[in-house]
Image: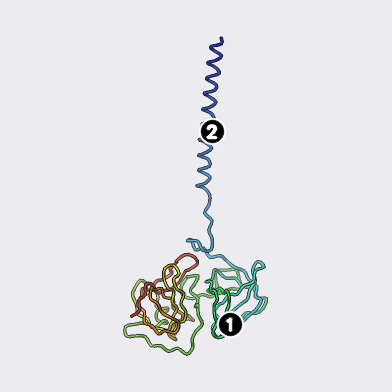
Amino acid sequence: MKQLTRKYTKIMRILYFIAIGVLFITSCNTNSQETIAKPEVVTEESDNNIPAKHKVKVLEVVQTSSYSYLKVSENSKDFWIAVGRVDAQIDDIYYYSAGLEMTNFHSKELDRVFETVYFVDGVSKTQTNDVTQSSYTSTAKTNATELDANLKIEAVEGGLTIAEIYKNGDKYADQKILVRGKVVKVNKKIMDRNWIHIQDGTSDEGLYDLTITSQEIVEVGDIVTFEGVVGINRKFGSGYSYGLIIEKAVVK
């Protein structure tokens, strides 16, 4: 009788440990499935590039010949945005998608430095996608500098003006082109390249500032001829997205 009791106890212990093992394995599988099933969090700067909608109230309006600088409020936070000139009034409500952040931006026309200003594609008074936009679908296709109305730089032989590039961007996509202009802004060594803005005095539908990426070293005020590849709707991450840009440019 004692032997049977011992055997029964031993069997029960074995069954107990087997049950514990099964529960442990089941628990691990469940946790693994829950981890895999977690939805991806999509942010404004994610690779999915889903534009976030902003609703802002205008607190202050500063007009220039090309831009409207609007001090706005959103969720109790005040900041500046810049958009192609609009007839904005204090207390107006506007909607817009993501903008390109510029720090320590100097407005020559205003002789004023904005510590931070967001250049947006366009604004709308209704919460729709029908904002005033240009030809390309980038969140950063707005001019990043003000127009130099005194510039009149002719295209080099075999080259294109900035207006021609913007007007026929799709035609020149992924092709090498020549463009000549005055350097109006340089951001050095961002994502292992220099970001150069040039103007030549021409524009297409209000677009006159051409962004160029290059390893070349140039300075503001230089008149330079670049040869580079036309990129359409390029996304670089970290908020850098361009409807039209000249890449891998070299000085000719």
Residue 123 point in image, percent of width and height = 57, 74
Residue 65 point in image, percent of width and height = 55, 86
Residue found at x 54% / y 12%? 4
Residue 112 numbered tag: 1
Image quadrant where residue 67 sits: bottom right
Structural distance between the alpha carbons of marks 2 and 1? 68 Å
Q: How would you rate the neighbour count of disc 1 (Cα within 10 Å): few for under 14, some for 14-19, many for 20 or more?
A: few
Image quadrant where residue 250 sits: bottom left
Residue 37 point in image, percent of width and height = 51, 47
**Which residue ends up furthest to the left in the rendered image?**
158
Badge 2 marks a residue whose secondary structure is helix
Residue found at x 34% / y 85%? 156
206 w.r.t. 14: above or below: below
**Circle 2 sits on which residue?**
23
Residue 173 point in image, percent of width and height = 37, 72
66 w.r.t. 20: above or below: below
**Which residue ends up furthest to the top in the rendered image?**
1
Q: How would you rate the neighbour count of disc 2 (Cα within 10 Å): few for under 14, some for 14-19, many for 20 or more?
A: few
Residue 98 numbered tag: none
Three-letter code for the amino acid on which mark 2 is drawn: Leu
Between 93 and 4, the residue placed more toward the observer is: 4
